[in-house]
Amino acid sequence: MKDINLIPEEIKLHEINRKKRVMNLISFVVMVCIIIFILLLPQIYIRNLESERAVLNSQLNNIKDKKNAYSELQNKMKYYSSKQSIIKKLSKKKIDITEILNDISSNIPDNVSMTDIKFSGNMIEITGDAYMNKYLSDFMLNIRKLSYVDDIDLLDTKKSDNGLIQYTLQIKLKVV
């Protein structure tokens, strides 16, 4: 059996044209979508990069804050270590009053007495009585021999009513 196509040629052409138009329309829509995608892809990439940049900037600011805190901590450590070294120096330089009093009491002759001792910085002022100038000069020589004594001066001497010599000595201590 043979098929005979009874559809007129016009309708056939119309059908073919319709299929071509649909194909052309689909191709056009696909091309428009591809063009839009190509145009939007860089914008999407730029937004993605900007969001990464914002994250990196926040991390950088966080690192800067930590760096500032670290440098501040380093400065405080330097400050405190300098203060600590000053404290150590002062501890080495400090005057041991008990040692000084022990040395003075062990070097005082039998005929010399002390009535008053005043400390002021690196100066000591001793007031007392002696039977004779010789004993007072012996006392001054004994004190001068101490390693931490820089200078000793006799500020005042008076003869008292009871026959004793009242004296005032000023001892300057070495500042190490």
Image (spheres, grey):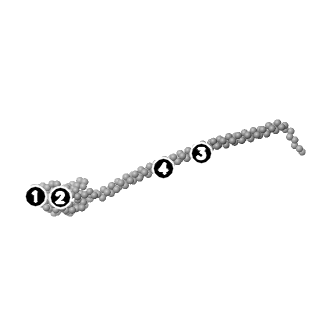
Query: What's the CA distance linking mark 3 and mark 4?
Result: 27 Å
Query: What's the CA distance linking mark 1 and mark 3?
Result: 110 Å
Front position among marks 1 and 3: 3
Callouts 1 and 3 close, C-beta under 8 Å: no
- Residue occupying the point 89% across, 45% down: 1
Question: In the displayed image of the protein, which residue is found farthest to the right?
Answer: 1
Amino acid type of the residue that numbered disc 4 sits on in the rendered structure: Ile
Whole-percent x, y for residue 77 in the image: 39, 53
Report the residue marked by disc 1.
163
**Number of callouts:** 4
> Which circle's residue, 4 or 1, is located before the other in the chain?
4
Query: Which is nearer the eye, 35 or 133?
Result: 35
Amino acid type of the residue that numbered disc 2 sits on in the rendered structure: Met
> Which circle's residue, 1 or 3, is located before the other in the chain?
3
Callouts 2 and 3 close, C-beta under 8 Å: no
Secondary structure state at the residue bearing disc 1:
loop
Report the residue marked by disc 3.
45
Query: Which is nearer the eye, 19 or 167?
Result: 19
- Residue occupying the point 74% across, 41% down: 23
Q: Specify whether residue 117 is in view.
A: no
The local crowd at label 4, few if under 14, some if 14 to 19, many if 20 or more residues have their Cα within 10 Å, is few
Query: What's the CA distance linking mark 2 and mark 1?
Result: 16 Å
Report the residue marked by disc 2.
114
Query: What's the CA distance linking mark 4 and mark 2?
Result: 68 Å
Front position among marks 4 and 1: 4
- Location of residue 22 by image quarter: top right
Report the residue marked by disc 4.
63
> Which circle's residue, 3 or 4, is located before the other in the chain?
3
Query: What's the CA distance linking mark 2 and mark 3?
Result: 95 Å
The local crowd at label 2, few if under 14, some if 14 to 19, many if 20 or more residues have their Cα within 10 Å, is some
